[in-house]
Image (cartoon, helix red, strand yellow):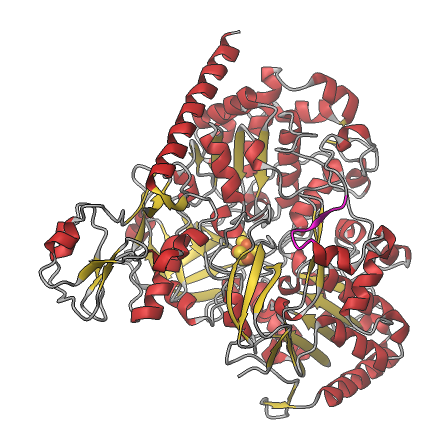
Amino acid sequence: MNIVYVDLDRCVACRNCQLECSFRQAEITRDDGANIWVQVDLDHRAIFTSTCLQCETAPCLAACPAGGLTRDPATRAVVVDRNACLGCGMCLLACPFGHIHLEQAGRVASKCDLCGGDPRCVRVCMAQALHFGDVEELAEARRERSGRRLAVRATHREEAAS
Amino acid sequence: MIRAVPVLPDGRVRTLCRMCDSRCGIEVHIRNSVLADITPAPDNPGNQGRLCPRAHAALDLFYHPDRIQTPLKRTPNGAFEPIGWDQALDEIAGRLKAIVDQSGPPAVGAWKGEGVGFFQQEGYIRRFIRALGSPNYFSNDSVCFNGRWLGHHLVNGFWNPFPYFDQADLILLFGSNPPVCHPPFLREFADARVRGARLVVVDPKLNPIGCWADVYAQPRPGTDAALIWGLIRLVIESDRYDHDFVDRYVVGFEKIAAYAQRFTPEYVEAESGVWADVVRTIGDLIVRNRPRVSLYAGAGLEHHPGGVNTVRASVILSCLAGAMGRPSGLFWPESPRLASLDSRNLFLENGGRPIGADRFPVLAQMAGEGHSLSAVNAMLDSGEHRLRSLLVMAANPAVTNPNVLKVREALSRLDLLVVSDFFLTPTARLAHYVIPGATFLERTELHVHPKYQTLYLAPQVVRVDGIPTGYELWRDLAGRLGLAEWFPWPDETAVIRHLLEPGGWTIDDLTAHPEGIQYAPLRFDRCLNEPLPTPSGKVEFASQYLKNLGLDEIPEYRPPEAFLPASPEFPLTLITGARKSLLYHSRHGNIDRFRRVHPKAEAEMHPDDARNLGLENGDTIRLVTAGGALIVAVRIVHAAEIRPGVIELYHGWEEAPANLLTLDEVNDPISGFPWLKGVPVRVEKI
Ligand code: SF4
């Protein structure tokens, strides 16, 4: 299945994704809380960006007592049914990553729904740190790259030695 | 609601985004004759299928309810009344004619803003003012861009502002925040980084990109040149620079080698506050990663009186690092063979001596334009050289030029001020006539991208009855002044046909290639095989041209205190001009969703300074400089985020213009730039 995947090596924390997500949330719900988070730790000069992974065995889905979360048959995203959601917050507690938030205006859960299959955060990621694709393909690309990097380092070492 | 007539009722139009000068490829979606969406074009090499969030704001601007849709005339009581196009132009032309008859053509000036870019629209304005017989062309470049343009051109005669960062092994960013200013750089940075390239960021403010860097250095504002000279010294000392290159291509190496001697890491530390060890680390990175070094000098380097010299020093450092003739470094892009609407040289051959040419001859001679800060003085002049009329296109100097109170006073003294813009900006509010401005979606325009050496046609996407394109405005005005032969083309398409003629391209060729046509193969080594466009034909580490003008032969470093003696009255340092992600200079503050992200003006301050001044987050303070005072809220940032002693204030707030505090009379002797960054300041709690 396709998910939004963050390549942390490429993320410069420009926050375009977070801004764009909050604009879309505001269009739907008048609440501009984003569902992708760019965290900058200035003490350690570290950047961490994350969003919902649309887990296959989603703890949030299992925890929901009201049928407020369902799986979109087309995109396989876990989506909030704003009419059924009680706003109890169980899903927030269940998500091991903190990838759901409570929308202030409607007091219901809010999470990444992959924008129905064309995630806007990816569109505005100029660094190409965000990708929308099959998780397996993404993992493969990642494997390839880390392999290449090791090879490059080895060549550099050889060059330096010679 | 605006009377929009899209070029097609339904479908997509490929064009280029002109919400900033990166000019990313976009597709504008039209549904039921409404501009419904903007998405990235799939195959533009710059943005590669991505866009920044500002692109979509083109639609917010286009449909903005406050947009001016008819010409406006100011009434005696200060209000504006809508008038017809013909009446507006007849009256403007009549008043211009009277001024020219009484005081001569130089009493009229034209002022171009960033909003219309740097090529075709600039060409119309330059052409118009020259047709009128006045040398007085001014632009936003007087306070941004020209400093770097001159700095590069003085050393090697060209500037490629967009190197191929993805080919670099070491990227050095000085005074630049590309995630906000140049979003398309990011893909290249990331490509280089995942390949193992190193990144060094030098900036008094720690932006997130500084968190991503291998080395982050936080200098005292205005002292970058000391650091750069320190690095020049280390590279020379390492003896790892290219001797052959220096022997064959460089003028003045001995002079700079001798001057660099005093810039030991310890001296650099004393001047800039960057630790000596960090200076050595950066020097070592340059030596180890040469020649694939990309050194990017951001606007942070040019916005102070030592700006051009700092940029010149940075180019010298690049050259010594082996960057000349490499895609990641300095290369001399070719220009397409296009007809010129107004070449800078023609202007000079015609004896053009714009206002400011006496004080800043380099600016007039090399950039072919007047000095906008001197223009403000000339508006306030009472003598025969008074500038009496100004035609302003997409510029907002009442917010974005230094010393705004003086600028506003000067603009209100004009006998005729005409402003073309989308909104009633603070500048437009001072005008006698306001002409509705067309967005980039409403015009057909050629674009040249020197990095890829491509030529694009950005077609008109939508027409709005009653809103003239830039071309129509200048054509119709010229016609009324008896200058019709200067604008003989019926419309923009005809202008473009004329521009394309020398190169033999047609509009059809360009339309068939919305991804652009490469007009010449990229030859990165051109600068090593042809004489450079400098007076000596070589790389000028030392400039005889500047020396003859009584200016610095080599780019000497001068600390901020050399321009304004340190005074206990102003113990802190103000930096302005750092960008906000969604705002663009003085623009976009009226887009609601952007405004929610950047709700109000705030001066950013280090927690230690706040503690010393007894300030809490959100307190109101008064900032006072030698130029003026401003009341604003304070935001106390993380201790790592800004250098202690430094206050940062964004420059585009209409309600709190940082340019109340900047200094228009302390200038870079070469470019004439004002002092915008590193201004001595005092903070008063109120
Ligand atoms: S960087 Fe953003 S504003 Fe600039 S041209 Fe590209 S999409 Fe437009």
Q: Is residue A29 magenta?
A: no
Front residue of B187/B630: it is B187
Q: Give above or below for B648 relative to B301.
A: below
Compared across the picture, whether A122 is left or right of B549 comes to left
Q: Which residues are magenta?
A: B513-519
Most distant residue in the front direction: A73
Q: Give above or below for B142 relative to B238.
A: below
Compared across the picture, whether B341 is left or right of B229 comes to right
Q: Residue at x 48, y 66 (%)?
A: B653
Residue B346, horizontal then vertical, whole percent: 88, 56
Front residue of B38/B386: it is B38
Q: Is residue B518 magenta?
A: yes
Q: Give above or below for B85 relative to A159.
A: below
Residue B71, horizontal then vertical, whole percent: 66, 84
Residue A107, horizontal then vertical, whole percent: 18, 68
Compared across the picture, whether A9 is left or right of B121 comes to left
| Displayed quadrant of residue B110 | bottom right
Front residue of B113/B205: it is B113
Magenta stretch, overall SS: loop
Q: Residue at x 63, y 69 (%)?
A: B461
In the rendered image, is residue B369 in sight?
Answer: no
